[in-house]
Image: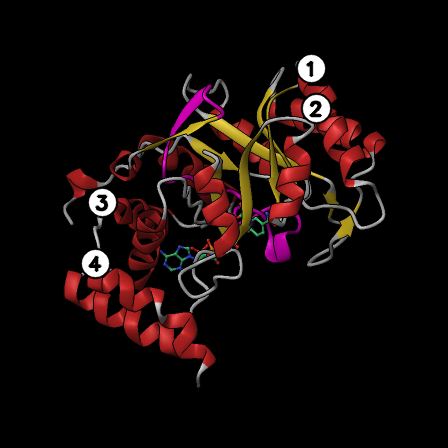
Amino acid sequence: MGAREISANSAGTIDLGGELSVSRLGFGAMRITGEGVWGPPKDRRAALAVLRRAVELGVNFIDTADSYGPNVSEELIAEALYPYPADLVIATKGGWNRPGPNQWTHDATPAHLRKAIEGSLKRLRLERIDVYQLHTPDPVVSFEDSVGTLARLKEEGKIRLVALSNVTQEHIERARKIVPIVSVQNRYSFADREWDYVVDYCERNGIAFIPWFPLGAGRVAGQILDQIARAHKVTPHQVALAWLLKRSPVMLPIPGTSSVRHLEENVAGASLHLAAQEYEALSRVPQLVATR
Ligand SMILES: NC(=O)c1ccc[n+]([C@@H]2O[C@H](COP(=O)([O-])OP(=O)(O)OC[C@H]3O[C@@H](n4cnc5c(N)ncnc54)[C@H](OP(=O)(O)O)[C@@H]3O)[C@@H](O)[C@H]2O)c1
């Protein structure tokens, strides 16, 4: 793949809630924080450079969360990109906190979500968040109360579009009775297909599906990936992203990286087209792993 082909636009576009349109290859801004998604990055200038290069390459959907750092990811996005290009969509999240490195604690109470959104607005220097995702349902808080709070914040003009993360189809159906849901973000890759039925549900209902951890490859997956990558003279990461983009027109991958080189490689993957049999071979990986 030549340099002129490096553009997130090669992945096509996706519509979010009939209001926003973004390139179907986004950027996940969790990896620009410190070790264990905690504190500032080792190399601040490099993190800022990754964000700016992403936008130069046509990426106009950036995923983040108040808990990445915490705060660090949102602050770096604003520092690198504010004032934002008109077409840039920043999708942040709240409801899952980060008290220390590699630690997560739930708090999707209405009071916390309200406070979290005020914090994200301030750090991102925005008056309204384009896409706000409930990071994960809180087991000790009514799901309807969490989603209802986001619906009210939408009415109040603090959120443009509401989204979910780490949810089942039942959650999505319950949430949609309260407010339109524009995207769902769950763990997913060609080798990690627990949420296949949620991808299909999203496709049927015009909801974007945002896969996190897009490369869950084990040994078998690695062999097939490598074979296909060699045939196309590309990297295994690019093949994994191409599989996702082919899986569904509502798929919006957000590979995360702290490196400009990896970012360019991932965005270049947007123009890779897999043959039907290559796609099928990768699709069979979970069965191969299960029968070993
Ligand atoms: N909703 C949720 O609960 C949730 C959970 C996890 C993540 N997320 C979001 O999803 C995004 C993506 O998920 P993820 O970051 O966990 O997983 P990922 O994108 O599958 O993997 C990121 C890791 O792969 C490396 N990498 C990326 N591109 C590469 C390349 N071309 N070659 C070699 N290594 C490469 C990165 O290291 P380098 O920095 O060295 O490139 C990084 O360690 C996150 O950034 C975050 O925004 C959401």
Q: Which residues are magenta?
A: 17-41
Which one is nearer the viewer's eye here, 115 or 260? 115
Mark 2 neighbour density, 10 Å: few (under 14) some (14–19) many (20 or more): many
Three-letter code, disc 2: Ala
Q: Is residue 21 toward the left or the right of residue 227 in the image?
A: right
- Residue 255 point in image, percent of width and height: 43, 49
Per the rendering, the mark at residue 14 is: none
Q: Secondary structure at mark 4?
A: helix
Q: Residue 58 colored magenta? A: no
Q: Which residue is mark 2?
A: 151
* Residue at x 62% of width, y 52% of height: 37
Per the rendering, the mark at residue 276 is: 4
Mark 1 neighbour density, 10 Å: few (under 14) some (14–19) many (20 or more): few
Q: Which residue is mark 1?
A: 155
Q: Name the mark nearer the viewer: 4 or 1.
A: 4
Q: Pointers 4 and 3 in contact (CB under 8 A)?
A: no
Three-letter code, disc 1: Glu
Three-letter code, disc 3: Ser
- Residue 167 point in image, percent of width and height: 63, 48
Q: Which residue is mark 3?
A: 271
